[in-house]
Amino acid sequence: MKESVTPYFQTDEPPFKYGFKWWLSKLPDSEEHVWMGRGFGGQNLVVFPNEGLIVAFTAWDILPNSTGKEPAPSDFLAAV
């Protein structure tokens, strides 16, 4: 598990890095990586390991007039 959430590649979508099947993003002012399973249309599973929190976010952002902007992982912590 530890190897799968280690950032190995910088992606074309800052601030995301990629491990083995997990998208990884650092929280602001933190060294913690949040693990994300990102799906089609904004379907995300976000794991906050230090907080012991898992967030399932469902969206359907595929319409022609969509903004294409997904919430940042830190947005979920503010909501909790």
Image: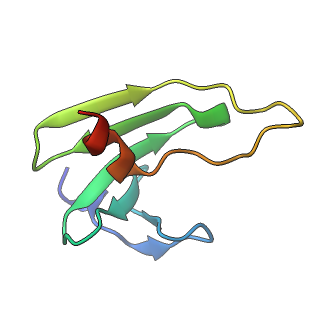
Left or right relative to 62: residue 37: left
Task: Indicate the quadrant where residue 18 lies.
Answer: bottom left
Q: Give the residue displayed 67% in from the left and 25% down from the top.
A: 60
Q: Residue at x 57, y 36 (%)?
A: 39
Q: How is the image coloured?
A: rainbow
Q: Residue at x 78, y 38 (%)?
A: 66
Q: In this image, 61 relative to 13: left or right?
A: right
Q: Position of residue 13 (x, y in %)?
A: 59, 66
Residue occupying the far right of the picture: 64
On screen, residue 42 above or below 16: above
Q: Is residue 65 above or below residue 60?
A: below
Q: In the displayed structure, does residue 28 sit left or right of residue 42?
A: left
Give the image location of residue 27, x and y in percent. 28, 62
Q: Position of residue 47 (x, y in %)?
A: 27, 41
Viewer-closest of 46 and 1: 46
Image coords of residue 21 (percent x, y)? 43, 49
Can you say which quadrant of the picture contains the C terminus? top left
Residue at 34 percent of width and 40 percent of height: 76
Q: Residue furthest front?
A: 78
**Tag count:** 0
